[in-house]
Image (cartoon, rainbow, N blue to C red):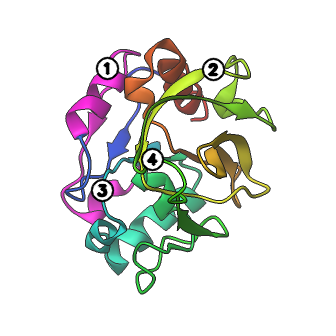
Amino acid sequence: MARRNASVALIDYQAGNLTSVRKGFAAIGVELYTPALPAELEGAEAIVVPGVGHFNATAWLNDEWRAAIRKEVVDGAPLLGICLGLQWLFEGSDEAPELPGLGLLKGQCFRLPSSVKVPHVGWNSLEITHPAALLDGIPNGTQVYFTHSYAAPITTESLAGTSHGATFAAAVQGGSTGAICGVQFHPEKSGEAGLRVLRNFIGLI
């Protein structure tokens, strides 16, 4: 397990409830810092990209931020995307087709079908298909909290899916470093299971 004073960066691009994410990590004894400039990411031991709302919000993360995040990931820093932050790790989203994602994971995010209530808000179960470090100790069928209208596709990096009109990636881990992680649900709002996910992520440092 990483030391409690590990240097973990929380990216603020004006599209996420940073307070609740901070509280989630504080509950497992980890403090986060928020870099004001891309250069302040240098040396981060892990990076967290939160987010809620429209994919257009990710435009704030310009080429300089993208390069800084990629550099730290290549240097070995685990990366965790939460909700919109997960979707941004992929190549793009139908919500804003002209705007590229970070592209560390292959695939295009899509809108949940109109045959069900959208946005998908509330508790739903994880259908775990490929257990890995991020979901260590999380039983199949665990209930976690979602709030979203768009979702990421099931790919080889998907650890768990959830169904709401369509099956989508609820948790991922992989990429070139094996430590590019993401969850569509909000771990900071998902009780003890969510805190376990955050502990597992910090354990990747």
Direction from residue 178 to residue 60 in the image, left or right: left
Q: Is residue 170 magenta?
A: no
Instruction: Give the residue number, with chain letter if any, for mark 2.
Output: 142
| Extreme-front residue of the structure | 115
N-term mark: 3 or 4: 3
| Cα distance between the residues tagged 1 and 4 | 33 Å
Q: Are marks 1 and 4 in contact (CB under 8 Å)?
A: no
- List the residue tagged with mark 4: 117
- Mark 3 or mark 2, earlier in chain: 3
Q: Are marks 3 and 4 in contact (CB under 8 Å)?
A: no
SS state under label 3: loop
Q: CA distance from mark 3 to mark 4?
A: 17 Å
Q: Badge 3 is on which residue?
A: 53
Residue kind at label 3, given as amino acid type: Gly
Tag 3–tag 1 contact (CB < 8 Å): no
Q: Which residue is mark 1?
A: 26
Of residue 73 and residue 155, the one placed in the foreground of this image is: 155
Extent of the magenta region:
18-43
